[in-house]
């Protein structure tokens, strides 16, 4: 796949947060400790406590773990709180100095954290700040989980929902993304139900099929953003590798295997993909592709007026055009909602997250 060039980085040591419960038991045994120590440590490390801070854990064991599998939460470099809706955006520094952004969104039904899965992104989507500068490296499962733990510890609030819609393409970091899902679902840790987790992908068809075989009842969101390959390839280079027909085939396979509804994300961009004619073609595509051969998939489209990113110059359509687009889909039997924009004053909305670089110990925000 020819996308944005990926930079190389050193492989960081496996940290404690990347161990699942069974692996932690095995680690205890390998360190000459009784495996019940895992039951002391696992729940507490998901509450933001390092082994040396956990009551009942010997200092000698804490020292062994520091040497073998250090406990590292991301460090908060900057915290921005929206004056509009209370959304909080974090700039986190990881153990190797790389930085990612994470967002805490507060709803009446509970708190949702939007996590990053990579440092940077190589997908190259035209409307997204996350891809500027390309991908540096994948995040480990523990680094992804660490964002949730750090947000909860900092805010003092429970996190009940997770969306994997931050920096990076989760299915481009498949093994770590799937392990993260298992980690946060474990009842001995964060105990977040799979049905409270959404994973968003640019449309890596092979990854979608592979995910279907993992038996994870999460919500899958597909970034579609255009009703035809010519338009989609112009704003999403991934379409050249996985054109719409292949993507729709993968969606059918996913639904047949899991029975789970897929949500489609569609960023509305003025003069690109947001006319009533575009809406008609989108409805025709989805109905033709996903409601055939005895298949009658429930279809939901999330409409996202493009959010400002300085480097792109892309603009959203007028409110009336957005309403007309949604109405056209509804008339064609496609359920459509317009996503509420959260954190508009702190660039915390969809497509606005980006990596930052560290310079002289300070964070340089590349905005």
Image: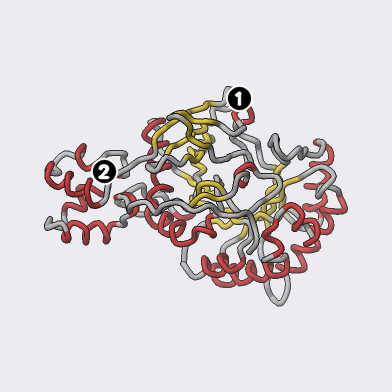
In the image, is 311 to the left or to the right of 24? Answer: right
Q: Quadrant of the C terminus?
A: top right
Image disc number at residue 44: 2
Front in this rendered view, residue 87 or 66? 66
- Mark 2: few, some, or many residues within 10 Å (few <14, many ≥20)? some
Q: Quadrant of residue 219?
A: bottom right
Look at the picture and state if 312 lies above or below 256. Answer: above
Q: What SS does tag 2 mark?
A: helix
Residue that badge 1 annotates: 84
In the image, is 36 to the left or to the right of 355? Answer: left
**Horizontal and vertical percent position of residue 350:** 63, 41
Tell me what residue is drawn at x 69 percent, y 76 percent: 294
Tell me what residue is drawn at x 69 percent, y 67 percent: 248
Q: Quadrant of the N terminus?
A: bottom right
Q: What SS does tag 1 mark?
A: loop
Image disc number at residue 159: none
């Amino acid at each position: 796949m020819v996308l944005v060039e990926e930079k190389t980085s050193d492989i960081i040591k496996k940290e404690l947060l990347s161990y699942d419960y069974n692996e932690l038991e095995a680690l205890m045994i390998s360190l000459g400790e009784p495996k019940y120590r895992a039951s002391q440590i696992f729940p507490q490390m998901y509450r933001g406590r390092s082994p040396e801070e956990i009551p009942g854990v010997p200092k000698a064991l804490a020292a062994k773990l520091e040497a073998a599998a250090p406990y590292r939460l991301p460090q908060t470099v900057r915290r921005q709180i929206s004056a509009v809706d209370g959304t909080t955006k974090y700039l986190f520094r990881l153990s190797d100095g790389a930085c990612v952004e994470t967002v805490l969104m507060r709803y009446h039904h509970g708190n949702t954290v939007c996590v990053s899965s990579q440092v940077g992104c190589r997908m190259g989507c035209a409307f997204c700040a996350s891809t500027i500068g390309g991908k540096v490296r994948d995040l480990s499962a523990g680094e992804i989980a660490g964002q949730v733990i750090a947000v909860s510890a900092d805010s003092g609030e429970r996190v009940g929902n997770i969306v994997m819609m931050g920096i990076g393409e989760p299915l481009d970091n498949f093994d770590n993304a799937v392990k993260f899902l298992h980690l946060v679902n474990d009842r001995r840790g964060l105990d977040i139900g799979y049905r409270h987790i959404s994973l968003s992908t640019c449309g890596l068809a092979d990854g979608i099929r592979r995910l279907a075989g993992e038996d994870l009842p999460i919500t899958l969101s597909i970034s579609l953003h255009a009703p035809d390959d010519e338009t989609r390839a112009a704003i999403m280079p991934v379409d050249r590798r996985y054109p719409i027909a292949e993507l729709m085939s993968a969606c059918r396979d996913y639904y047949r295997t899991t029975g789970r509804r897929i949500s489609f994300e569609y960023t509305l961009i003025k003069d690109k993909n947001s006319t009533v004619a575009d809406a008609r073609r989108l409805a025709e595509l989805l109905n033709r592709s996903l409601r055939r051969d005895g298949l009658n998939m429930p279809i939901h489209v999330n409409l996202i007026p493009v959010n400002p990113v300085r480097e792109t110059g892309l603009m959203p359509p007028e409110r009336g055009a957005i309403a007309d687009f949604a109405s056209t889909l509804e008339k064609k039997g496609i359920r459509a909602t317009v996503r509420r924009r959260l954190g508009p004053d702190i660039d915390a909305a969809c497509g606005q997250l980006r990596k930052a670089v560290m310079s002289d110990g300070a964070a340089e925000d590349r905005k």
